[in-house]
Image: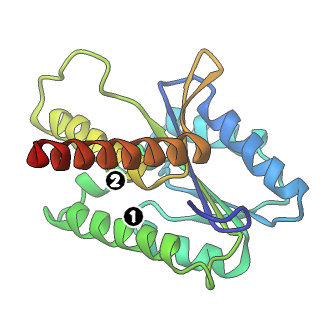
């Protein structure tokens, strides 16, 4: 179990217009209220008018004094850069980053960037001296609850998003799913600790039963 003043990964996911970005921004504001500096790491690219309007709306909604870093492709490097000057980094969002990577001309680009991303998260978790009291907040779209799409790229996007979410959720301290503006907590540090303790007790019980059977 990590210490109270150690680093933190908070993963927030939900559908379109579910309120996930609002929750993430509130979590960042709460971190800021305790003296942490915040960096907003944006992954969106304005390829059309509709996306441009979405980006503008996000800019209006979040505090203007937060640092801003735009990185549609190289997420791991951007996280390291942001953490050099800020205590809390909010990434919005992972599925846009995934989409950007999958559309890259290099077919191996996403695999390379995802590997670098997961490796950095493990470094963030294990190197508490370098990242002590730092906080990462990740926002992502849950896209696996609908009809399986017909196009190959669309199916690949849904599959990769699901696998990415599973890996990130396994590493995160806290995971929240947001629907209709209401967060459902799927994982917290306390729940995680209790689950580990329960599993440990279960293993001890099984081992004890095996020993008793051998004796008999």
Residue that carries the numbered disc 2 in the rendered image: 100
Residue at 59% across, 78% down: 128
Looking at the image, residue 4 lies above or below residue 152:
below
Total number of numbered discs in the rendering: 2
Few, some or many C-alpha atoms within 10 Å of disc 2 (few <14, some 14-19, many ≥20)? some
Mark 2 vs 1: CB contact within 8 A: yes
Q: On the rendered image, what quadrant is the C terminus found in?
A: top left
Mark found first going from the N terminus, 2 or 1: 1
Q: CA distance from mark 2 to mark 1?
A: 6 Å
Nearer-the-camera pick, 104 or 28: 28
Nearer-the-camera pick, 138 or 39: 138
Query: Residue 25, located in which quarter of the rendered image?
Result: top right
Query: Residue 101, located in which quarter of the rendered image?
Result: bottom left
Element at label 2: helix
Looking at the image, residue 174 lies above or below residue 181:
below
Looking at the image, residue 197 lies above or below residue 73:
above
Residue at 44% across, 34% down: 141
Residue that carries the numbered disc 1 in the rendered image: 73
Horizontal side of residue 58 vs 168, given as left or right: right
Nearer-the-camera pick, 49 or 147: 147
Residue extending farthest to the front is: 216
């Amino acid at each position: 179990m990590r210490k109270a003043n150690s680093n933190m990964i908070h993963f927030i996911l939900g559908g379109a217009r579910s309120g996930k970005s609002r929750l993430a921004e509130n979590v960042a504001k709460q971190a800021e209220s305790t003296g942490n500096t915040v960096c907003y790491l944006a992954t969106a690219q304005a390829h059309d008018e509709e996306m441009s309007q979405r980006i503008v709306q996000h800019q209006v909604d979040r505090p203007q004094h937060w640092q801003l870093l735009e990185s549609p492709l190289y997420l791991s490097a951007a996280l390291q850069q942001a953490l050099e000057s800020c205590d809390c980094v909010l990434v919005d969002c992972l599925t846009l980053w995934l989409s950007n990577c999958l559309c890259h001309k290099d077919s191996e680009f996403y695999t390379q960037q995802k590997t670098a991303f997961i490796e950095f998260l493990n470094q963030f978790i294990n190197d508490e001296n370098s990242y002590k009291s730092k906080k990462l907040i990740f926002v992502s779209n849950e896209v696996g609850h609908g009809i399986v799409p017909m196009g190959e790229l669309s199916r690949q996007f849904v599959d990769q998003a699901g696998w990415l979410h599973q890996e990130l959720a396994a590493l995160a301290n806290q995971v929240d799913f947001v629907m209709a503006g209401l967060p459902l907590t799927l994982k917290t540090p306390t729940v995680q600790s209790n689950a580990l303790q329960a599993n440990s007790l279960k293993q001890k019980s099984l081992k004890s039963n095996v020993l008793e059977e051998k004796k008999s």
